[in-house]
Amino acid sequence: MSKGIKTSSLGYPRIGKNREWKKLLEAYWAGKIDEQSFRSQMEDIQLQHLQTQQQAGIDLIPVGDFTFYDHVLDTAAMFGIVPARYGYKGGEIPLDLYFAMARGNAEAPACEMTKWFNTNYHYIVPEIGSLTPVLTANKPLAAYRFAKERAGIEGKPVIVGLYTFLKLSKGFPAADIAAVAARFLPLYVQLLQELQAEGVAWVQIDEPAIVTGLTAEDTALLQNIYSEIAAAVPGLNLMLQTYFEAAEPLEALLALPVQGLGLDFVHDGGKNLESVARLGWPQDKTLGAGILDGRNIWRADTDAKLELVAKLLTYVPQERLILQPASSLLHVPVTVEGEVKLKAAVKNALAFANEKLAELVLIAAAANEGRERYAAELERSREVLAVFRALPERGREDVAEQVRALAQLPDRRSLPFAERVKVQQEKWRLPLLPTTTIGSFPQTAEVRQARLKWRKGVWNQERYDLFIKRQIAEAITLQEELGLDVLVHGEFERTDMVEFFGEKLAGYLFTAGGWVQSYGSRCVKPPVIYADVAFIEPMTVKESVYAQSLTKLPVKGMLTGPVTILNWSFVRDDLSREAVAGQIALALRHEVSALEEAGIEMIQVDEPAIREGLPLKARDHECYLNWAVKSFRTATNHVKDTTQVHTHMCYSEFNDMIGSISAMDADVISIETSRSHGELIVSFEEQEYDKGIGLGVYDIHSPRVPVVEEMTSAIERALRVLDVQQFWINPDCGLKTRGWEETTGALRNMVKAAVLVREQH
Ligand code: GLN
Ligand code: ZN
C-alpha cells in the first residue's frame, strides 16, 4: 500500500506466445490427448501467464479471465445456464458438455456466437430462457486459489457483471430484465461472499455494457444490483469496470455503492476525462484509469501518458489511482519479441501485451518516484517514437495531395441510379433475374498447396501464374456450362480478402506472430497499417482480364472495400480511422480505374465488415456510417455510367442501415440472408430500396445441396416485396470454404430455380 499509484491488468491474452493454448484445445478435440493431460497442460499455460504479469511488476493481476474457450460461456456454465437440448442434469459442468455448448455435438447444435461489442472477438450467447440459475462452481475463487498456491500471487478475481451478462444473453423479453436479474442476484452475492471469506482484496466486475448507453431503467437496475451486492460484501473492494467507450452519465455510476470505477481514457473520445473534470472525483472511490490502448499494437507516448496521469492526479489522490490498460489485453498479440524480420524503426514502435505491461509499470514508477529517476527509459521511448513518426512513408506529400484533390471532386456518380440503370440495361442486356455468385470458388487443398509452394520459392512466379490461370479457365468453363449470367474469376490467387490487398498496397506490414483470438481456438493475424496507404500498381487486373478473355459473358472484377480493409487490420493511431479509410479508398479508386481501362466494367467492391466498425452508442452511428459510405463512394463513384458497381455484405442485421446501404449507391448489392430470411425481407417491406439486389437464395455454410423448390420459394418470397426487375439470384456468400461437388450441385439447382421463376414473369 505504500507505493502510491498502483498498476493493474484487466485480462491477459489466452492463446500463448506460440499459440500453445489453441494447439492444446485442438489436440484435445481431435482426441489426441485425454482430459487429465489437457487440464494439466492448461494449468501450465495459465501459470505462465500469471508469472509473466507478476514478473512485469503488475500489482493487481487478474485471475479468472483465463478460460478454455470464452469467458461469457464460463459465466453461463458457472450459473448452470445450459439449454435443455444438451440433456444437462445439474452439478458441475463436464468438460465435454462445456465444449458442446460452444461447438455443438451429434445431438445438439452449438449456442449462438456473436461479436463482443465492437471488437473482433466473439462470445457464446447465453440462452437463459426459463432456466433457474444455480452456482455450479465458483470459477474466480478456484482461479484465485490457483494463483496463490502456484505462484504466490494475491490475484484480483475478474467476473462478468450481472448487468452485462443479462444484456448479452437471450431467451427472455428485454422488458423482463429486472425480474431475471432478481433470479441471479443471490448467486452473485454468494459467489462474492465466498471470495470475501477467502480474504480477497479487490474484485473486478466487468460491465462494458454500460458504455452502450443507459436508459433510466438501466440506471435503476444497476443501482439495485450494486446496492444489494455491496451490502452483502462490505469487506470486499469492488472495481466496477467499463471499457471500449465513455461511461455516461458518469453521475449515475459515481452514485453506485462500489469502491472503484474503471474508465477507458483511450477510446472515450475524451469524454471520460471531461466528465471527471466536471464532476470531480468522490472521496470514497478508487479510479481504475485505463490509459493504454488495449486494442491496438502501438507503443505508447509515455510523455503524453504521464501528462494524463498528472491531470488525473489533480482530481484523484495517488493512493486511490490505479493505472491499467483501457481494456483486457485479449485483443492484442502476446509479444513483439519474435518479430525479428521487421525493420527496427517499426518493430520498436510496436507494443503487444507484454510490452504494454512494461510500459504501464514504467509510467506508474515515473509518476510515483519522479521522471528523473526514469529519464533514460523515458528518453528511449521518446527517441523510438520520434524515429517511427519521422518515417517518410508515414507522411507522404503525394498521398496528401491526392486526398486534397479528391475533396474537390463531386462525391457522386455522374448520373443518378434511375438514369444510369437505363444505359446499363442497354449495355448489358441481362436476362430477367440474372444469376451470379459472390466471387470465390472452392479453395481446394491443391490451390492452397500451390500457393505454399510459390511462397516458399519451390515454384517460381511463372509456374504459379500458370496454375492460377488453369484454375480460372476451369471455373469459367464450368460457369458457362451451368448457365450463370454474370461470372467471376474465382479468387484462387487470394488467401484472405484483406491480406491479399494489404500485400500489394503501400503502408502495410505483416507480423510473424501477431495473432489474436477471434473465437474459441480460432486466431487471426490482422495485417498492420503503419504508414500512408497508397496504390502501387494494379492488384487484380491480370486475373480479371484473363478470365474475361475466355468468355463473352461479363466477368465481375472483385475488390475488397475500404471499410472492410480498415476494420480487419490493426490501424495506425496518429490519423483518424476516417482518414485512413479515405487513403484506402483512394488506392482502390486507382484499382477500379485500372480494371475499367482494361475492359472490366462490372466491378464488385465487397464490404462484409462495414457494420463491424459501428460505434457502441446509437447516437454515434450516423457519423460513422457517413464516412464509411463516403469511402465506398470514393472508391467507386468515378466509373462510367455503363459500368456496373456491385457490392456484397455478409450479414442480414441491417434494418437500421438500409438508408446507408442505399447511399453507397452501388448498382447491385448481394446480401447474406439464410440466417434470418424472414426478418430481412420485412426490412424491405418497411423501407424503400430501388437498386439491384440479390438476397442470397441458399446458405453456403452447409455442404448440403439445396433442392430447386427451396430456392424458388425463397425467390418468390422476395419478389412479393422486391421488384422482379431489380432482383438478382445468387448464393449467400463466397464459395471458398465449399467443395466442388456441392458447389456445382447447388449452382445447377440455383440456375434451374431462376429459369423456373423467370417463366412465371
Ligand atoms: N468476394 C468474396 C468471396 O466470395 C466475399 C467474401 C465475404 O463476403 N466475406 O469470397
Ligand atoms: Zn459474404
Image (tube, helix red, strand yellow):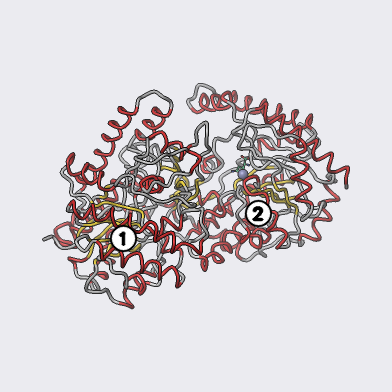
Camera-nearest residue between 378 and 292: 292
Closer to the chain start, of discs 2 and 1, is 1
Figure check: 709 above or below 615: above
Q: CA separation, marks 2 and 1?
A: 41 Å
Q: Nearer the viewer, mark 2 or mark 1?
A: 2
In this image, 12 relative to 712: left or right? left
Residue 226 is situated, as x and y percent measured from the top left of the image, at 32, 65
Figure check: 84 above or below 371: above
Q: Three-letter amino acid code at disc 1?
A: Ile
Q: Residue 115 carries which label?
A: none
Camera-nearest residue between 5 and 424: 5
Residue 613 is situated, as x and y percent measured from the top left of the image, at 51, 56
Camera-nearest residue between 454 and 646: 646
Q: Name the residue under label 1.
A: 291
Camera-nearest residue between 546 and 747: 747
Q: Three-letter amino acid code at disc 2?
A: Glu
| Mark 1 element type | strand
| Mark 2 element type | helix
Residue 620 is situated, as x and y percent measured from the top left of the image, at 51, 66
Q: Mark 2 points at which residue?
A: 679
Mark yes or no: residue 61 visible: yes
